Image (cartoon, rainbow, N blue to C red):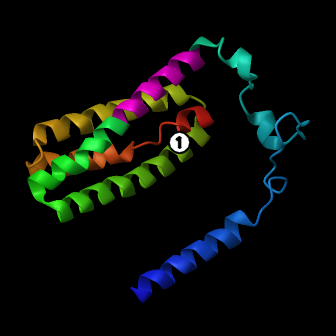
Amino acid sequence: VLACVACMWCVVGLLCWRVLRKTPAQLGQHADGAVEVPSVMAAAAMPQLPGPLLWRHRGFRTLALAVSLSLFAQTGLVAHLYGLFAQAEGAQTAGWLMGLATACAILGRSVVARVLRRTAVPRAVAVATYAMQCVGTLMLLLAGGAAWPWLLPGVVLFGLIFFFLGAHTAV
């Protein structure tokens, strides 16, 4: 227990020292409504649309609708997964499976962030992740809660895209 506490303090301390001590100005950010200082990133970025104009853009509306529906479906699935796994495999195994899905979510979000930095096509990335989500969910359905050859890959594939869909619109 003390080792876990020490590890947690080290991780939180490192995050505070490396990330939280920086001011928004040091990160090149500015307050809403303030005049933006030109930067290399801003020059290379896609044109930004202000709030009301953004909703007139058909591509944004369809992507926002898809992301919203997907997050709604993911929330419902996650709410039931632990209970299904616990009934079929026991509480401890269900906990490990949900932990695996979470670890895969962190990995998936990191990969998508890197891919989106290199490509300015968020829709293509969204299509690929929705395809992975469909395959992972189908594997979970085929597993029926207890068929390990389908269950483990289903959890991994579902986890890789688990709640990271907001990254599509972030770039």
Is residue 17 positioned above or below 41 on the image?
A: below
Instruction: Point out residue 103 in the picture as x, y percentages from the top left corner.
Output: 38, 58
Report the residue at 31% width, 43% height from top.
78
Position of 55 relative to 32 (above/below): above
Which residue is rendered at x = 40% and y = 35% of the image? Answer: 129
Q: Is residue 17 visible?
A: yes
Which type of secondary structure does the marked residue at label 1 adopt?
helix
User: Above or below — where is 4 with respect to 149?
Assistant: below
Range of residues picked out in magenta: 59-74
As rendered, which of 40 and 81 lies closer to the eye?
81
Find out whether residue 151 is within the magenta segment.
Answer: no
Q: Where is residue 152 in the image (x, y as percent from the top left)?
A: 19, 52
Question: Taken as a whole, is the magenta stretch helix, strand or loop?
Answer: helix
Quarter of the image with the C terminus is: top right
Q: Residue at x 54, y 34 (%)?
A: 168
Q: Which residue is drawn at 29% across and 55% down?
A: 98
Quarter of the figure with residue 107: bottom left
Direction from residue 122 to residue 149 in the image, left or right: left
Q: Name the residue under label 1.
A: 115
Vertical relation: 48 (above or below) 149? above
Horizontal side, residue 19 vs residue 41: left or right: left
| Amino acid type, mark 1 | Val
